[in-house]
Image (cartoon, rainbow, N blue to C red):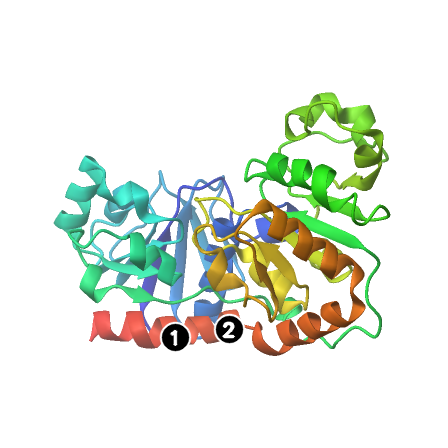
Amino acid sequence: MATIAFADRTSDYDGRSLETRPLGGTETSVIYLAEALARRGQEVTCLTHCREPIVHRGVAWASLAAGMRGPCDLLIAVQHPELLASVPQARRRAAWLVWPPHNIGRRGNLLRMWWHRPLPIFVSDYQVGIYAPWLPGRAQGLVIPFGLPDSVRGRAARANPPPPHAIFASNPVRNLSWLIDLWSRQILPRVPDAELHVYGLRDYDYRFGDDWEETRARYGRFLPDNCPPETLRSLKPHPPGRKEALWEAMRASRVMLYGGHRAEAYCLSVAEAQALGVPAVVRPIAVLPERVRHGETGFVAASDEIFARHAADLLTDDDLWRRQHEAALTLQQGWSWDEMAAAFESRVIAPLLA
């Protein structure tokens, strides 16, 4: 058994937060991996901006300000090099890079990386490709993809295609406005009865039952100028909810549409949708070509016109949808978090502590 500490400054969360409020991919991944390692017999502590010390599902949670008493065998700093000093008596250190590593090369962070010499752990090949060769640890760095929750894996094929409903399930600043504009101009005219269900608006207020027209003042910056009434009618915003509800909404959708963003290092929402059997149309931005098998489980579209055409095809062509739905269920299941934790033990923990 090893004593492992995670350090993450993303938000004020702990292990209970996964069950009580929407979380981003970073917080979710820390919780899942920490709990999986604890189930496998490791002694795990997570240092975050949580409000009180607790033990939940075998994982101890404490605040970064309070720190961890005594040493640990392995400190895992989540993305930010300044967190490498969170446990001064750590025997070994790793940097778990869950975002693109652009911040690593800044002067202060670079000095911290050279001082602590952590093992870089990436979640995608895309990250390795943009990790500068002169940064510390590049040659030793490992790629260990995220796991996926058991609830999204191993589903049976749907008996019938869903209605022509598309889903967006990411942070709205990640090109939701681009998608709605393309939806209005090129997708909806091809499929007039289609709907675009929008999830991920967790930073905005809701009154249940409102439509886009009634509440556009709250998030009108995501809508194109002079948005046509038919577009407003086709857009279906949803309040934030638990992960299980989002997964069921994905499963009920015909296609996931996501234009991508340079900040994506893994894109859990597309990975989860694919594991659920939902074809996806994405652009060749950042890591997205790794998440979708072009022509098999969705499409990686090189232009707006191609994106719109593939989206319309998946919304209307039952045979195409069926092929890609079943291919996603076969090819895109990924690892469970327990499998990912096993890889983490064998590739990270055991060699570092040998």
Q: Residue 104 at what x, y percent from top left?
A: 26, 44
Q: From the image, tell me which residue sits under label 1.
A: 343
> What residue lies at 66% left-to-right and 63% top-to-bottom?
279
Q: Is residue 105 left or right of residue 53?
A: left
Looking at the rendered image, the quarter that the C terminus falls into is bottom left
Q: Secondary structure at mark 2?
A: loop
Q: Which mark is residue 335?
A: 2
Measured along the vertical axis of the image, is residue 220 above or below residue 315? above
**Labels 1 & 2 near each other (Cβ < 8 A):** yes
Q: Which mark is residue 17?
A: none
Q: Residue 47 at what x, y percent from top left?
A: 39, 48
Label 1 vs label 2: CA separation? Answer: 10 Å
Q: Residue 133 at what x, y percent from top left?
A: 18, 55
Measured along the vertical axis of the image, is residue 151 above or below residue 61? below
Q: Is residue 8 left or right of residue 149?
A: left
Q: Secondary structure at mark 1?
A: helix
